[in-house]
Amino acid sequence: MTKTIKELQEFASKHKIILSEKGEIGFGRPCVGFLHGDNYIGYNPTKDGGNYAPVFGKHDDRLYPPEGVKSYHKGDYLAVLVSNDNYDAGLEQLLKWINHLESQGEVEVVEFETGATGLQTIMTGLFGRAIRIKS
């Protein structure tokens, strides 16, 4: 497991994000994933405010998790759900996802305006971070 964590930490360091080895997403769902501040990194984010239009114009199918990765299903976040407190399995799945992303091209983490207003800004902030494949 040390090799897996080392590779995930290297990815986090390279992109100035945080590896969450034992986190929660949604309403207390155990997970592992990548954070910027208190928010998970997105991969196909949509604008808040009712219309949920893709931030980057269209969804990039290359960013979706590969077969066998149990990603969080209520939002496009770079987070893997953990079953039965088996965080090691979650970290292995997360590394599989990262390897898949890196096989698609050069990965970058970019800032975007969330479109949040009112109370939503407390949860998501005015700006979020998302993973992209450089063009």
Image (cartoon, grey):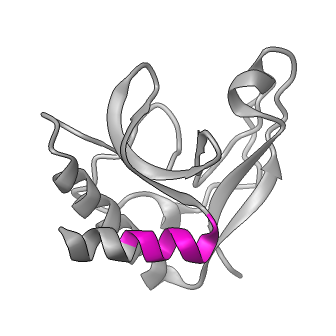
Tell me, yes or no, if residue 12 can be seen here.
yes
Q: Is residue 96 left or right of residue 132?
A: left
Q: Which residue is rendered at x = 61% and y = 39% of the image?
A: 38
Residue 43 in the image: state x and y as whole percent: 58, 55
The quarter holding residue 22 reads: top left
Q: Is residue 92 left or right of residue 47?
A: left
Asked if residue 86 lies left or right of residue 127, the reply is left
Residue 79 visible? The answer is no
Q: Quadrant of residue 135?
A: bottom right
Classify residue 105 as left or right of residue 31. right
Q: Main secondary structure of the magenta part?
A: helix
Magenta-drawn segment: 8-16
Residue located at (24% from left, 40% from top): 82
**Residue with the most extreme top position:** 119
* Residue 39 point in image, percent of width and height: 61, 41
Please give the name of the residue rendered at 46% of the width and 25% of the height, measured from the top-left corner.
26
